[in-house]
Image (cartoon, rainbow, N blue to C red):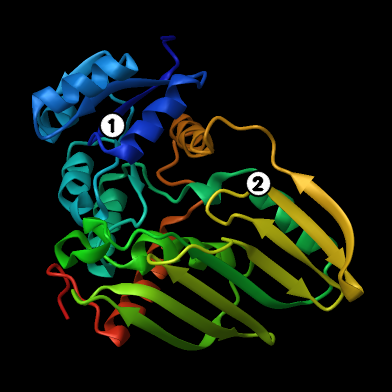
Amino acid sequence: MKQTDLRVGIIATGWIAEKAALTIQHMEGVTCHAVASRTFEKADAFARKWGIAHAYGSYSELLDAEDIDLVYVGTPHSHHFDVTMEAIQKGKPCLVEKAFMANYDQSLAVVKAAREQKVFLAEAIWTRYQPVVNTIREIIKSGRLGELRLLTGSIGYSMGDKPRIMRADLCGGALLDLGVYGINFVRMFCDAKIEQIESQCMKSDTGMDLTNTISWRMEGGIMANIQSSACCVNDNQGTICGTEGYLIVDNINNPQSVKIYKRDRVFVEEIKVPQQITGYEYQFLACKNAINNGLTETPYMPLDETLYIMKLMDDLRFKWGVHYPMDKR
């Protein structure tokens, strides 16, 4: 480890923490320095597997360590609030997995605390940090698609048997787990003011949304259609359509290519995404750059945008009658 490496402490040892550890293992300038679990045995096994120097049997122990430059919160989003708030109070910069928190109220409280303490905070919605985002923005800006008129994002996995989808206490449902990608896809490329939203969902026996559709109308005559499902597989594609052409993004959950078409659906060009470790590396690099430059948030995913999306998802859930124990309404 070099003296200038960003020393990351991972909170939790689930599959998403595994992906973070795998990514960091192959990065330069970023080191997985510590891991914490609710038991030392789990943390120690994780540390041995990934060659991590320090293992802690509680989250608080890691947050008390002085040699951590960034805390990566990889617990289920139902458990983000307490550990993130503790980290901020202890002055630890945080990168928090999506969905950022259980709801808007928790998100607002955490953001206010970070801003008051002047502590770095960011949401780990990894697609926001990938280089292909700027590629697509440049295509739109160039006018190759003409004037934007429609954006669509669809994502689906057959995972309705998973507790994190079915249980209210784990903030279940397709929206916070999957739909957040579709919402971010649209918002990354068109943040025009939303004038009207229509939506509906199909719920599980436990009251969680399993499949949902969201349609909104924006200023300037632009529409967006988003679908997410935790009980069926689909193509995970995104489209951006204009008056002169359109593009298709292969996999809004981790874009691999962008295909551009002009009028009459004539294929023009395919842009391949550069080889990556997992795609997670870009969010860690963005955090390192922000922290090194004295910033308290990253321009790739501003905290105000995180709050906007959390409020939007609250409004959708409450309309559907999908509630979590930590909701105030």
Q: Which residue was labeled with disc 2?
A: 256
Kind of element beneath mark 2: loop
The structure residue drawn at horizontal position 73% and vertical position 53%, both measured from the top left corner, is: 258
Identify residue type, mark 1.
Ile
Left-right relation of 24 to 66: right
Left-right relation of 220 to 259: left
The structure residue drawn at horizontal position 44% and vertical position 66%, both measured from the top left corner, is: 232
Q: Position of residue 113 (x, y in %)?
A: 24, 53
- Label of residue 40 in the image: none
User: Which quarter of the rendering shows the C terminus?
Assistant: bottom left
The answer to which of marks 1 and 2 sits earlier in the sequence is 1
Kind of element beneath mark 1: strand
Q: CA distance from mark 1 to mark 2?
A: 27 Å
Q: Which residue was labeled with disc 1?
A: 10
Q: Position of residue 184 (x, y in %)?
A: 51, 63
User: Which quarter of the rendering shows the N terminus?
Assistant: top left
Q: Position of residue 83 (x, y in %)?
A: 18, 44
Q: Position of residue 100 (x, y in %)?
A: 33, 56
The structure residue drawn at horizontal position 30% and vertical position 84%, both measured from the top left corner, is: 320
Identify residue type, mark 2.
Gln
